[in-house]
Amino acid sequence: MIFPLLLTIAASQCYVVDGDTIRCGSERIRLLGIDAPELHGCPRNRTCAPGGGQDSKCSLERMMGGALRIEPVTRDRYGRVVAQVYAGGRNLSCQQLRAGQAIYKRAWDNGRRLAQECGAAR
């Protein structure tokens, strides 16, 4: 699937993979600028976001509803679309940060878009 510059899609056509990734059809979409806890714990020799992976996933699931506005920024090394994703006019990355279900990763915030939009990222 070639991803357009802007997409509006019903949230019911997408599902939450984990606290910072959703899937819409064949596309995996990574929320811009955040890292959420791993669902199955942190692998050895890796630094992971603190907290419970299942809690973070459930938090994101509660935020999904109505229409999603997806603004792709880039693709990551795993082939996922990295995007600003909005539900109900709210940026889901910002919402996950405010809920304490993810941490801000400046290195993953292409163009500092999230930092400009989201006070919790500063």
Image: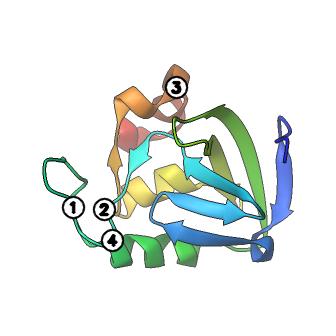
Marks 4,2: beta carbons within 8 A:
yes
Real-space Cα separation, disc 3 to disc 1, in angstroms = 25 Å
| Residue 59 % position (x, y) | 45, 74
Real-space Cα separation, disc 2 to disc 1, in angstroms = 8 Å
Q: Nearer the viewer, residue 38 or 19?
A: 38
Residue at the location (39% across, 57% down)? Answer: 98
At label 1, the amino acid type is Cys
Looking at the image, tell me whether mark 4 or mark 3 is earlier in sequence order.
4
| Residue 69 % position (x, y) | 77, 52
Q: Quadrant of residue 53?
A: bottom left
Q: Is residue 42 above or below residue 82?
A: below
- The residue labelled by disc 4 is 53
Real-space Cα separation, disc 4 to disc 3, in angstroms = 24 Å
Marks 2,1: beta carbons within 8 A:
yes
Residue at the location (86% across, 39% down)? Answer: 4
Q: Nearer the viewer, residue 101 or 117?
A: 101
Which numbered dot is residue 66? none
Q: Secondary structure at mark 4?
A: helix
At label 4, the amino acid type is Gly
Real-space Cα separation, disc 4 to disc 2, in angstroms = 5 Å
Neighbours of disc 2 within 10 Å: few (<14), some (14-19), many (20+): many
At label 2, the amino acid type is Pro
At label 3, the amino acid type is Asn
Marks 4,1: beta carbons within 8 A:
no
- The residue labelled by disc 2 is 37
Which numbered dot is residue 110? 3
- The residue labelled by disc 1 is 42
Mark whose residue sits in front, 4 or 1: 1
Neighbours of disc 1 within 10 Å: few (<14), some (14-19), many (20+): some
